[in-house]
Image (cartoon, helix red, strand yellow):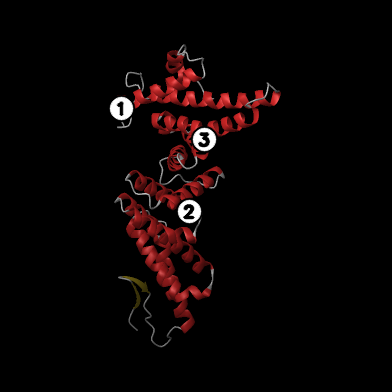
Amino acid sequence: MTATGLLCFGFAVSVPAQTDSRNPPMAAQRFDSDKESLYALFSENKEGISPEQQKRAYLAAKVFLRRYGGDNDNYAKEANEFLAKFEKKVSEDEIYAAYASRNYAKAFELGRPLLKAGAENFFVLSVLAEAGYENLLAGNTTLNDETIDYLRRAIGLLEKGKVTAADPFKNMGLAVGFLNNALGSFLKDKSPGEAANAFTKAVQTKSSYEKDPLTYYRLGVALLKGPYAHLSDEYNQKFGAQQSTAEQLAALKQINHLGDRAIDAYARAVALSDPSRSGNAVSFSHFTPEFRSKVLAQLTALYKSFHNDSEDGLNELIAGILTKPLP
């Protein structure tokens, strides 16, 4: 009898030749031999690091499951798990390629089915968050609502400790920084209170956002437009015509604390955008002298409103602000 082989998408799985025609193998024996040979091809390549090995393992697993998946044994389970992981990786690569080519709509189109299948896929949520953010920067708002949802979900996974790999980010600090900064950027006008919380988390990370003047500036603006304005209105309505009480003093203390936080954020933006400061690496277009002058003017007006219309101490505050912890 001649040797028999299984052709698997362009590669062969050889089965040992039967040389004794007087004793042909039983059907069950031949079935087991073919199955073992195909599984061996899959097993030999599934841990390989090269794309070629991974593809061979994938194709072998496809054929194996088509022929022997109904056995529901450990071999079939292993092949199924590998297949799902491989196809997920291929889909994720396609999404990232669409994002990298700035085809943001296609990235979202490819990503939605994956998120329906796995709602906690941090990689896909993050790539779509990056795509949606860059789409916003390009002046297109059509993906905004969807992007905000993905940002919140990705941040939630991080905060619940469900993320074990930072991909597509270099590290966890950058993941937390980018996602919160992006969320704050989307919400700074429609929900400044939530934006202030997001910007605060962004600058507290060990990442580039810790020294980003624009993030600090936006934090200061969001604090004033959100919680500071809200508490000030509430204070005026409740205590405007009343004499001092313990409750009034507590409310005033809370408002003043928010003012101090806003002043601190503005001062950090001014300090970090100073090109003459040692250690600064001002390299982005929005950190121009005009940017710094604008922020400094706003900081000066804000500082004076909390210090009896005086600028005394402001220069010292700016000079030493980066040595102090966030309030």
Measured from the top left, where is residue 3 in percent x and y?
A: 34, 79
The local secondary structure at tag 3 comes to: helix
Badge count: 3
In depth, the one of 176 and 170 nearer the eye is: 176
Q: Residues within 10 Å of mark 2 (few under 14, many from 20)?
A: some
Identify which amino acid the numbered label 2 is placed on: Asn
Q: Which mark is residue 121?
A: 2
Task: Give the mark, 1 or 2, whose residue is nearer the N terminus.
Answer: 2
Quarter where residue 295 is shown = top left
Measured from the top left, where is residue 321 in percent x and y?
A: 46, 19
Q: Residues within 10 Å of mark 1 (few under 14, many from 20)?
A: some
Q: Which mark is residue 226?
A: 3
Q: Label 1 to label 3, Cα distance in Å? A: 27 Å
Q: Residues within 10 Å of mark 3 (few under 14, many from 20)?
A: many
The local secondary structure at tag 2 comes to: loop
Identify which amino acid the numbered label 3 is placed on: Gly
The local secondary structure at tag 1 comes to: loop
Quarter where residue 84 is shown = bottom left
Which residue carries the number 1 mark? 288
The vertical placement of 271 against 24, above or below, is above
Measured from the top left, where is residue 247 in percent x and y?
A: 69, 26
Measured from the top left, where is residue 96 in percent x and y?
A: 35, 52
Task: Give the mark, 1 or 3, whose residue is nearer the N terminus.
Answer: 3
Identify which amino acid the numbered label 1 is placed on: Thr
Of badges 1 and 3, the one in the foreground is: 3
Q: Label 1 to label 2, Cα distance in Å? A: 38 Å
Task: Give the mark, 3 or 2, whose residue is nearer the N terminus.
Answer: 2
